[in-house]
Each structure stands twice: as C-alpha cells, then as structure tokens.
Image (spheres, rainbow, N blue to C red):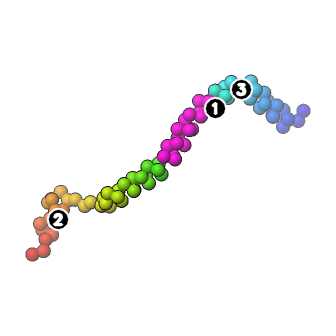
Amino acid sequence: MTPVKTCFKTILRSFVGNAAKLISLTVIMFPGVAFVSGLGTLSPTVEGSLENYLAASDVPDLTVKAPVLPTGYRRSSWRR
C-alpha cells in the first residue's frame, strides 16, 4: 500500500473508532455556537433601537460639565 492510502485508512479508522466522542462533542458545541451567533445578531438590533429612542427623545450628543460652577465656567474666564 502507498503511504497516502495508509494515512487515509488510519484517519478513517480513527473517526469510526471515536464516533461517539465526535457526536458528543458536536452536540456539546452546538448550543454554544448558537448562543454566540445569536448575540452577534442581537447587537445591531439593540444599537438601532437605542439610536431611534435617543433621536426621538431629543437627547443631546454631548454634555460638558466643570467642577467649579453649575454653569460650567470659571469666574476668572468671564470677561468684564
């Protein structure tokens, strides 16, 4: 037999001998893959609905605050 044919035969025997392990690993991995792919699909949906909610609520894009005065400016920066 050629080395390539022997290699394929060995790989086939390995799969046949460990069929139960292969099936159980597939069954174990399936819920995890389904969960992760579901979360990946959910992200754009949530971002889109959040964008629509913020636009409808007229929320400002940026709020600037300073720790000195409630107006956000220092008294020394006021022009007299």
Question: How far, Cα to Cα, is label 3 from label 1?
Answer: 11 Å
Residue extending farthest right? 1
N-terminal label among 2 and 3 = 3
| 54 up-or-down from 19: above or below | below
Q: Dot 2 lies on which element? A: loop
Mark 2 neighbour density, 10 Å: few (under 14) some (14–19) many (20 or more): few
Type of residue at label 2?
Tyr
Q: Secondary structure at mark 1?
A: helix
Q: Amino acid at mark 1?
A: Thr
Q: Residue furthest left?
A: 80
Q: Magenta stretch containing residue 30, yes or no?
A: yes
User: What span is in magenta?
Assistant: 26-42
Front residue of 28/43: it is: 43
Check disc 1: other Cα within 10 Å, few if <14, some if 14-19, many if 20+. Answer: few
**Label whose residue precedes the other's in the sequence (2 or 1):** 1
**Which quarter of the picture shows residue 1?**
top right
Badge 3 amino acid: Ala
Q: Which residue was labeled with disc 1? A: 26
Q: Is residue 33 left or right of residue 43?
A: right
Determine which residue is flagged by label 3. Answer: 19
The one nearer the camera, 43 or 20, is 43
- The mark total stands at 3
Q: Disc 2 marks which residue?
A: 73
Residue at image position (16%, 62%) is 71
